[in-house]
Amino acid sequence: MSRKNKRSLKEKFSLKNSLVKEALSEFLGTFILIALGCGCVGQAVLSRGAHGGPMTVSVGFAMAVTIAVYVSGGVSDAFMEYSDGKLEVTGPNATAQIFATYPAPYLSLVNGFADQVMSTAFLLLAIFAIFDTKNNSVPKGLEPIAVGLLIIVLTCSLGMNSGCAMNPARDLGPRLFTAIAGWGMEVFTAGNNWWWVPIVAPLLGGVLGAMIYVIFIEIHHSDPQSGEENDVHAKYELTNMA
C-alpha cells in the first residue's frame, strides 16, 4: 500500500510537459552557475586577493559550469566592510563586477564586441567538437568536465579584457539584480554603455563558431551507417553553457 502511495505521489508531482521540464532544468542550472561562479569572483574581490585571484576565478567559474551541466543534463555584510557602506560600479572599491562583466579601462566598445564574438565562437566551436560522435568525442558522461576545462582555457587566454561572459544569461540577470539591489542604473551606463555587448556579441559568436565547425569539420564526415542516425543530434542537447 505504501509503495502504491509513493508511486501516486510521484505521478502527482512529476511534470509531463517537456517544455516546462526543460525550463525548470535550465532555471536550476543557471542558478547554480551564477551562484557558484559569482561566488568565486566575490570571494576574490571582497578579500582583496587574500582568498582568491584570477586563477581561482577561472577554475571556480569553470567548475560552476561543469556542476550546472551535470545538475541540469546572497549579499552579505562583506560588501559594506569592503566599500565603506557604498555599492559602487566603478573605482577602486567597485563591487558590481562581482555579478556582471565590465570592460577594462583601455577597451573600446568595438574591440570589446569583437572580443566577445571571438571568445564565444571558440566556445561553441569546441563544444561542437566535444559532442561530435563522428570526431574524437569525449566519452559519454565526461562531457561536462571537458566543457569545464574549455572554460578554464578561454578565461585564462581571453578573460583579461572583459571577463569572457560568453553567455547572455551569465551577464544580464546578475546585472539586473545589481541595478535593483543598490548599485543603481550606472550598471547600464558604465564602460560607455557596455551592458548590451555581453548580450548581443555572444549570440553572434555562437552562430559563427557553430558555422565554422560545420563548414570545416562536420559536413566532411562520412555518411552515418544504419542505426547511427540517432546519435547525430546528441551533441545539440546542451544546457547551461557559460
Image: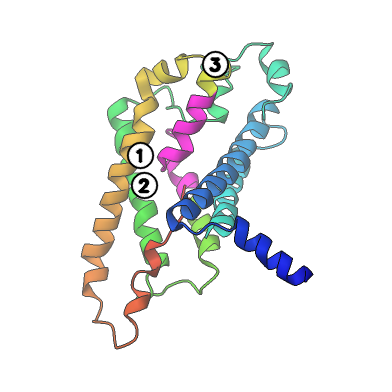
Which mark is first along the chain, 3 or 2?
2
Identified by mark 2, the residue type is Thr
Crowding at dot 2, Cα within 10 Å, few <14 / some 14-19 / many 20+, comes out as many
Q: How far apart are labels 3 and 1 at the CA level?
A: 24 Å
Identified by mark 1, the residue type is Gln
Camera-nearest label, 3 or 1: 3
Q: Where does label 2 land, which residue?
A: 120
- At a point 68% along the width and 20% down the height, the residue shown is 79
Q: Nearer the viewer, residue 33 or 114?
A: 33
Q: How far apart are labels 2 and 3 at the CA level?
A: 28 Å
| Residue 76, image x, y percentages | 72, 25
Residue numbers of the magenta segment: 154-177
Residue 79 appears anywhere in the view = yes
Q: Where does label 1 land, which residue?
A: 116
* Quarter of the image where one finds residue 58: top right
Task: Verify whether residue 166 appears in magenta.
Answer: yes
How is colour applied across the structure in the image? rainbow
Q: Where does label 3 land, which residue?
A: 183
* Quarter of the image where one finds residue 107: top left
Magenta stretch: dominant secondary structure: helix
- At a point 28% along the width and 82% down the height, the residue shown is 224
Q: How far apart are labels 1 and 2 at the CA level?
A: 6 Å
